[in-house]
Image (cartoon, rainbow, N blue to C red):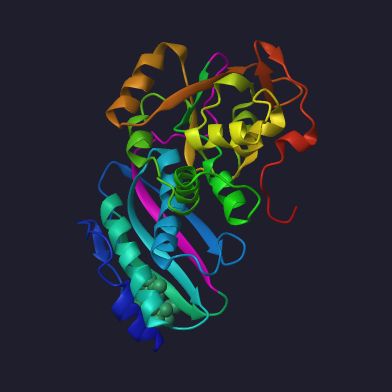
């Protein structure tokens, strides 16, 4: 298949046509005319075969994931996702694979209101790079720098499931069929929290999405807001699959290493955010409206020597550097 038939057959008509799109696929560049009073949030995420996914992963799921990891960045900013461009590098033009991938893109793009307006198609080792563009009311974005001493720290849903899924696929552990399916779904088809992220625009003082592990990621809030965080170890939200992993292996639920997947596992794409204590009821109400669970996991304190402290029953635990190793490329 030639490059142009790939584009024509598999990259067109993906997602809704927004009225602000003045030009989409077919010219040298797409053109967007943003509505008056809005600003654009722009982000890119790349997934490389063998690094971010197994080469034989279901193409429909892969399509969902490249959208989801980017949508999650929009959720973390409180932005409404609108447009995407996709740089696709393929080892070969396999029509069956491309059809499944394209159908996956169509389904997920429609669900999240994202229009594919351009991209690039090249031959090489399988890799996907998606740029997402969203809109925001002027100066309202949820940035990492607004956390204040005394704010509560929250996370959505549960933590560590995607890392459990990866361990399962790597044959490092075994779980019941239901728990395995839950953990592998968490890894391969994460659910970006866009509706909830947007509902936090007038509430959260800072926000990010947890992609490389909670501890490492919330350190960014500490750095950019010049504060420290105390995380309440017992409050970390775990799924029933995670509970099964603890019980089946007779792990000590109070040990940091037991919670390693939840503290440092990657690929969760849940939101971690801060809000003033007086806004707690609003936080839980908005979560209810989005049918999402939210857990208060700690609070913002004055800046101290460490950025993040893990606490159990009010006392700080001693953290070894190996306890808080989140994922980093080149390390
Ligand atoms: P150029 O040579 O100007 O870079 P291309 O020939 O690469 O343009 O692409 C032709 C058109 O198809 C452009 O509008 C481009 O945005 C679009 N396109 C190419 N690859 C993809 C893709 N994977 N997904 C969506 N649009 C694509
Ligand atoms: Mg090109």
257 and 176: which one is in front? 176
72 and 37: which one is in front? 72
Residue 237: give x, y in percent of width and height.
51, 28
Q: Residue furthest left?
A: 19
256 and 172: which one is in front? 172
Q: Is residue 28 left or right of residue 298?
A: left
- Residue 11 occupies which quadrant of the picture? bottom left
Query: Is residue 178 among what the camera can see?
Result: yes
At horizontal 33% and vertical 85% (from top left) the residue drawn is 5
Residue 211: give x, y in percent of width and height.
55, 45
Residue 14: give x, y in percent of width and height.
28, 65
At horizontal 56% and vertical 39% (from top left) the residue drawn is 160
Q: Quadrant of ligand 1?
A: bottom left
Query: Is residue 232 among what the camera can see?
Result: no
Quadrant for the N terminus in the image: bottom left
Q: Is residue 322 left or right of residue 234?
A: right
Q: Is residue 147 magenta?
A: yes
At horizontal 49% and vertical 83% (from top left) the residue drawn is 92
At horizontal 48% and vertical 33% (from top left) the residue drawn is 240
Vertical order, 96 against 244 (above or below): below
Q: Residue furthest bottom?
A: 2
Q: Is residue 21 magenta?
A: no
Vertical order, 30 against 39 (above or below): below
Residue 285: give x, y in percent of width and height.
31, 21
Q: Report the span colored magenta.
A: 126-150
């Amino acid at each position: 298949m030639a490059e142009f038939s790939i584009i024509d057959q598999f990259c067109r008509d993906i997602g809704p046509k927004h009225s602000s799109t003045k030009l989409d696929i077919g010219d040298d560049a797409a053109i967007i005319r943003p509505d008056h009073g809005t600003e654009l949030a722009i982000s890119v995420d790349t997934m490389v075969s063998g690094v971010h996914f197994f080469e034989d992963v279901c193409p429909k799921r892969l399509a969902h994931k490249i959208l989801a990891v980017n949508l999650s960045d929009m959720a973390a900013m409180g932005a409404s996702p609108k447009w995407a461009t996709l740089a696709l590098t393929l080892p070969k033009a396999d029509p069956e694979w491309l059809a499944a991938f394209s159908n996956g893109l169509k389904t997920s793009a429609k669900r999240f209101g994202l229009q594919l307006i351009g991209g690039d198609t090249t031959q090489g080792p399988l890799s996907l790079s998606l740029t997402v563009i969203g809109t925001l009311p002027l100066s309202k974005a949820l940035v990492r720098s607004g956390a204040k001493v005394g704010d509560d720290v929250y996370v959505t849903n549960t933590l560590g499931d995607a890392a459990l899924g990866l361990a399962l696929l790597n044959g490092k552990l075994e779980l019941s069929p239901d728990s395995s399916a839950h953990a592998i779904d968490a890894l391969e088809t994460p659910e970006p929290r866009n509706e909830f992220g947007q509902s936090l625009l007038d509430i959260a003082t800072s926000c990010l999405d947890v992609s490389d592990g909670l501890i490492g990621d919330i350190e960014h809030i500490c750095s950019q807001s010049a504060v420290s965080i105390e995380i309440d170890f017992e409050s970390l939200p775990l799924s029933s699959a995670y509970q099964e992993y603890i019980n089946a292996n007779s792990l000590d639920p109070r040990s940091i290493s037991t919670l390693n997947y939840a503290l440092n596992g990657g690929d969760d794409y849940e939101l971690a955010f801060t809000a003033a204590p007086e806004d707690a009821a609003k936080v839980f109400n908005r979560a209810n409206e989005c049918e999402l669970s939210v857990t208060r996991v700690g609070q913002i304190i004055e800046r101290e020597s460490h950025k993040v402290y893990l606490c159990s029953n009010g006392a700080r635990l001693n953290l070894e550097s190996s306890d808080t190793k989140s994922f980093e490329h080149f390390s």
